[in-house]
Image (tube, grey):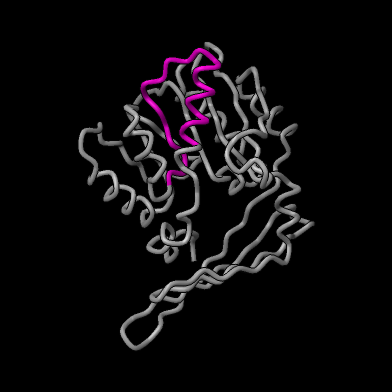
Amino acid sequence: MKPYGPLAPVYDRFTDDIPYEDFADFYEKIFSAHGKQVKTLLDIGCGTGTLTAALAKRGYELVAADASPDMLSIAREKSAKLAGIIQPLFLCQAMTELDLYGTVDAAVSCLDTVNYLPPEELPELFRRLRLFIEPDGILIFDINSPERLRALDGFTSVDEDENSLCLWRADFDEAAAALCYGIDIFTRRGKFWQRAFEEHIEYCHTPEALSVLLGTAGFTGVEIHTDGPQGALGRLFIIAENTPH
């Protein structure tokens, strides 16, 4: 089962503690610190679109991409309920298949989306971002640090409410340098419960390796920040500027 299929309908219910507004604040702080006038913005791996909606309400014109049609469907519905915003353009595209209709002033990606790509696929992501971000534009994304992923080895968690339950189990594969976690999702269907299962894999990426790959793709001024949202949990933010082509 591909990630974020059965999980999509309950995702927001069990992640309501994520500080999306803090992420938006952090991005705007970086834009300002780097002197960027950002109007058009790409949200990579937008999921159910909570961050997309938060940024749209701040006046940005959004392109939001995700590989999961189930998550995108929720994101579209969420955005459609908002009045007074420029409705985002939603694209069902994997990260390595990004193909925009034009360029954007900046691109962001939150909640360790980039960890879902194995190392050999990162160059293609950065090549495409280099192409679709305006010259002198900026890229901001975050990852779970390798230390954070290793620390989650053996971790289990249960999230539940009266109509659904999610059981998470994580195991770190040292040979693959990746955290594999299975999610059992139980949803009430009248008198019965329906069970679904997803498997997620997050790969370890070091800041040093990411810096090299970004430089090879043509990005410059790479910065690593630990002061962003959830930094105390091992979330690292990578910032890079797109040099003029």
Which stretch is magenta? 23-46
At x 64%, y 47%, the residue is: 118
Q: Is residue 104 above or below residue 245?
A: below
Q: Quadrant of residue 222?
A: top right
Total marks shown come to 0
Return the residue found at the far left: 83
Assess whether residue 45 is covered by the magenta stretch: yes
Question: Is residue 223 inside the magenta stretch?
Answer: no
Q: Which residue is at a point 25% across and 31% down the rendered structure image?
A: 86
Residue 95 placed where, x, y %?
49, 41
Foreground pick, 165 / 201: 165
Q: Position of residue 194 (x, y in %)?
A: 41, 80
Which image quadrant is residue 127 in? top right
Vertical side of 32 occupied by 162: above or below: below
Residue ID at (31%, 84%)? 190
**Left of 81 or right of it: where is 21?**
right
Residue situated in front as seen by the camera: 20 or 242: 20
Please tell me which residue lies in front, 37 or 42. 37
